[in-house]
Amino acid sequence: MKYRNPDCLGNFNFDNIAYYARKRFIEGYSTIELMLQTESNRRRQEIALVAMMDIDDTTVKNLHLSCQYKEQCKVTTCREIIKEMIEDNLKND
């Protein structure tokens, strides 16, 4: 089932993001390896969201993101959803 955050203006597929988070943090793929495995710009955006999980919340809040929705969206919303999905995924393993 495709999880959507109704407040996500980018309409990101959080199931894909959770998939890439698993690849990155559980299976040990690097961000570059994941980026090279897809030609889709949308998937690269999802992988980039995962890559930001390595950065602490304070630093992320201070970044000047180039996301087209940055004026309307809290930057930490995606991070919090991804963290919850990773935790749920690990509990189910």
Image: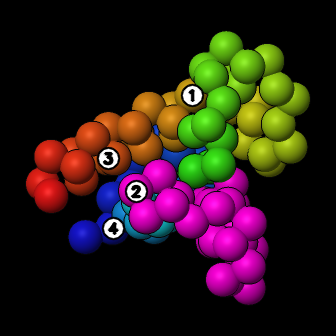
Range shown magenta: 24-48
Q: Which residue is mark 4?
A: 2
Q: Amino acid at mark 1?
A: Thr
Residue at point 33%, 59% (across, down): 3
Residue at point 33%, 47% (across, down): 86
Crowding around mark 1 (Cα neighbors within 10 Å: few <14, some 14 to 19, many 20+) is few
Q: Is residue 28 left or right of residue 73?
A: left
Residue 12, x across and y down, in percent:
53, 58
Mark 2 or mark 3, whichever is nearer to me: 2
Query: What's the CA distance linking mark 4 and mark 3?
Result: 12 Å
Quadrant in which the N terminus appears:
bottom left
Numbered label attached to residue 76:
1
Q: Earlier in the sequence, mark 2 or mark 3?
A: 2
Kind of element beneath mark 1: helix
Q: Amino acid at mark 2?
A: Ile
Please indicate, yes or no, whether residue 20 appears anywhere in the rendered image: yes
Mark 1 or mark 3, whichever is nearer to me: 3
Q: Is residue 44 above or below residue 59?
A: below
Query: What's the CA distance linking mark 2 and mark 3?
Result: 13 Å
Kind of element beneath mark 3: helix
Q: Which residue is mark 3?
A: 85
Query: What's the CA distance linking mark 1 and mark 3?
Result: 14 Å
Numbered label attached to residue 26:
2
